[in-house]
Amino acid sequence: LSSDTLVFVVLPALFDTMGPIGLVMALVFFVLMGIAALTSSISMLEVPVSYSTERFKASRPLMTWLLGGALALFSVIICLNFGALFGFVIQLSTQNIQPLVGLGFCVLGGWMWGRAKLFEELVQGSPELANSTFWRIWPWYVRIVCPLLVLLVIGSSW
């Protein structure tokens, strides 16, 4: 079984083995999963909307409708071609794009964003961080260890 069908094949079969309580559990699970997907979608839409309103000097409601509509159209295309596209999109996003984004964060946070600026941001949220062992180890961990681990993940997935 592939990872893209796990939630839609294995969990319903598991809930089916639970008898009448399984139907209730399945209903609760999938309603909560739908709520989680909706709230995640809203938070993921925030970044491109903020960027596009600043970049193109457009109104926030307009950009929200345009980008939300484009994503909804993309989602409908995937749903209408579920068998062919769903597994591809899941594999592309989880095995390819997410590790590359993680590597990008490591490079940005470890090498491109200045240590002083990063330290200033972190200490604002947690003042005790200034004298901690964490802060002495963290910059090198993010610069060396994390990129190597992410590259290992990328290499093992291809």
Image: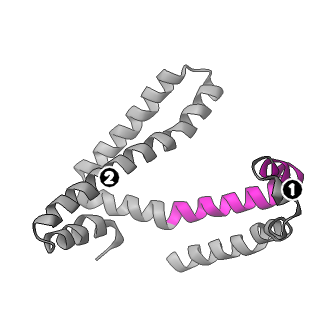
Magenta stretch: residue 61 in it? no
Q: Position of residue 145 (x, y in %)?
A: 73, 75
Amino acid at pointer 2: Leu
The residue lying at 17 percent from left, 66 percent from top is 22
Give whichever of 80, 142 is nearer the camera: 142
- Callout 1: SS: helix
Q: Quadrant of the N terminus?
A: bottom left
Q: Which residue is mark 1?
A: 115
Q: Taking 23 as reference, is 68 above or below it?
A: above
Residue under the image location 43 percent in, 27 percent down: 65
Front position in the image: 145 or 77? 145
Q: Is residue 127 left or right of residue 14?
A: right
Q: Earlier in the sequence, mark 2 or mark 1?
A: 2
Which residue occupies 88% across, 63% down?
Answer: 131
Foreground mark, 2 or 1?
A: 2
Viewer can see residue 62: yes
Apparent side of residue 120 relative to residue 125 in the rendered image (left or right) = right
Q: Circle 2 is placed at which residue position?
A: 32
Instruction: Give the extent of the magenta segment.
Output: 96-123
Task: Determine which quarter of the picture holds residue 128.
Answer: bottom right
